[in-house]
Image (spheres, grey):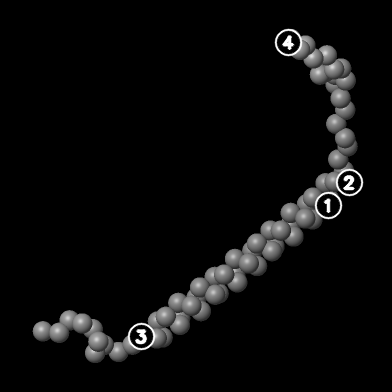
Amino acid sequence: MNISGGNLPAMTGAGESAEVYSAALAKKQQKADGAAALALIEGAANTSVAQTPAKSVTATLGNNVNVYV
């Protein structure tokens, strides 16, 4: 009884199709990442003009620090 598997045919097609599928998924992910990055950049560019600086409510906060030695 021989169970070594040396006489089985090589399945190169399965490995190649897995590589192609993996490459297709990677390309799709890169496109999605690029679209998300562009949307983030566009969103940051649009809101930076509309923002106004925050006004200080208490300008003296933190001016007096009690230090005991």
| Amino acid marked by disc 2 | Val
The tag earlier along the polypeptide, 3 or 2, is 3
Residue designated by label 2: 49
Left or right: 63 with respect to 35?
Answer: right
Q: Secondary structure at mark 4?
A: loop
Classify 60 as above or below 3. above
Residue at left 83%, top 52%? 45
Name the foreground residue: 41 vs 4.
Answer: 4
Quarter holding residue 8 = bottom left
The x, y position of residue 22, in whole percent, is: 51, 73
The tag earlier along the polypeptide, 4 or 3, is 3
Left or right: 58 with respect to 18?
Answer: right
Residue designated by label 1: 45
The x, y position of residue 48, in whole percent, is: 85, 46
Residue at left 88%, top 20%? 59
Q: Secondary structure at mark 3?
A: loop
Q: Residue furthest front?
A: 69
| Amino acid marked by disc 4 | Val
Q: Nearer the viewer, mark 3 or mark 1?
A: 3
Classify 41 as above or below 4. above
Residue at left 48%, top 78%? 19
Residue at left 69%, top 64%? 34
Are dots 2 and 1 in contact, CB under 8 Å? Answer: yes
What's the mark number on residue 69? 4
| Amino acid marked by disc 1 | Ala
What's the mark number on residue 1? none
Classify 23 as above or below 6. above
- Cα distance between the residues tagged 4 and 1: 49 Å
